[in-house]
Amino acid sequence: MDPDPRPAPEANPAPDPEPHAAPTPAPRPDPDPEARPDSNPDPDPRPAPDPDPRPDPDPDPRPDPSAGGRSGPGREGKRRGLRMVRRGVLAVVLALLVPLLAAETALRVNYTGDPAAGTHTRNQDAMWLGHAWVDGRKTDADVAALARRLRGTGIRDLYVHAGPLEHDGTLPASAYAHARRTIAAVHRAVPGTRVQAWLGDKLATESPDGLRLERARTRANVVRSTREILAAGFDGAHFDLEPLHSGDGNYLALLDDLREVTRAHHVPLSVAAHQIDPLPAFHTVWGTLTNHPKWWSQAYFGQVARRVDQIAVMSYDTMQPLRSLYGGYVAQQTSLALETTPPTTHLLMGLPFYHENRFGHWAHAETVPAAVRGVRLGLSRTDAHRARFGVALYVDFAATEDDWTAYREDWVRTD
């Protein structure tokens, strides 16, 4: 998630020079000119022997195998090889397509049924807010408007973008220069709301540029930056590091160190989490094909969840083309996350409060109503009475009135 997203003209080619007329070729001599009559013919001519006798043509000619003729073994071998390649490609396509179609059908079925009674807000929801809240662009009037928007909802935590981190893990204080004023204003306007520092950076997992978790000094800098933002008055630390590959042990080590800092300050440690494999080991297959695994294994998700106080699934950018498939996907993700998140950890499912159309995200499919229904269905089927559970709204500066209405009517209401 990036809260603040950021060719020389081709020179006219020189015209081709005017082609010159090709010279007229000189006439070639006739290679077999017709014989001229002899001025003194033989009175008794006899046919002269053929100086270049040629054998009679074979009545049953067969192509020379070495010539690679149209019907020769060489061409036939190429045809057999081409057929084998086509069959191999077809087998691979079917091996990928059949499970995919089966999975999509399962998602559609997963979207059916009625959510259980009581599967609504537990008043532990969250929302991501952009960087404008801490760099001086937002005023007290904006805080008052935000307070009116939050009043009567289940939102308790605000993840305010205070980064991004530098690639070495440091964070300049100038990045959140107005944080204290905003935090104090929110506390006055909406008592009980926690303002957490949203920190993140691009990881150098799929390109040479980015933050490298394998470096101990970088992890130590991230921990020091966390101490600094908590000293600035934030009520918690929320991390979003992407793309984070499943099984990354350096990330787990970082979370262990961060947990010591947040516990010492008596504030929550929160993370934004990748989606969970919709099919067994799907992140491995997808990573092999695209060099971007995207998903986490369910086991790794559980390892992360056990190390934090809050874990928010980024359950959007799913590549699903229909609302029913997206809603079924969110229902599946909710169930998978509930199965592996300990009851002591607060689990949140992300809602798409933005409307982009690009690869991986269809705005007409990934809607708040579809997401909320999916969340409720997954919650109903897996742990309907889960206490530490909520939804997280992404993101404030892209939200519409329809998004807020759907959230209030479908999730905040009570039966």
Image: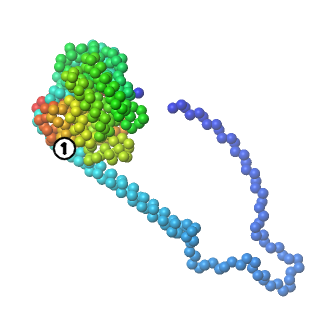
Give the position of the N terminus as an image quadrant. top left
Determine if residue 308 is in view: yes
Question: Which residue is pictured at 82% across the width and 84% down the height?
Answer: 45
Image-quadrant location for residue 403: top left
Q: Where is residue 136 in the image (x, y as percent from the top left)?
A: 33, 15
Give the position of the C terminus as an image quadrant. top left
Horizontal side of 212 relative to 190 (left or right) equals: right
Question: Which residue is pictured at 77% across the width and 66% down the height?
Answer: 30
The amino acid pointed to by label 1 is: Thr
Horizontal side of 15 relative to 374 (left or right) equals: right
Q: How many marks?
A: 1
Question: Which residue is pictured at 56% across the width and 72% down the height?
Answer: 63
- Residue situated in front as seen by the camera: 212 or 392: 212
- Residue situated in front as seen by the camera: 41 or 144: 144
In the figure, 146 relative to 278: above or below? Answer: above
Q: Position of residue 220 (x, y in %)?
A: 32, 27
- Residue situated in front as seen by the camera: 395 or 161: 161
Horizontal side of 169 relative to 40 (left or right) equals: left
Image-quadrant location for residue 151: top left
Q: Where is residue 276 in the image (x, y as percent from the top left)?
A: 26, 41
Q: Position of residue 392 (x, y in %)?
A: 23, 30
Q: Which residue lies furthest to the bottom in this view?
A: 44
Helix, strand or loop at disc 1? loop
Horizontal side of 80 relative to 65 (left or right) equals: left
Image-quadrant location for residue 286: top left
Q: Mark 1 points at which residue?
A: 112
Question: Which residue is pictured at 64% across the width and 37% down the height?
Answer: 14
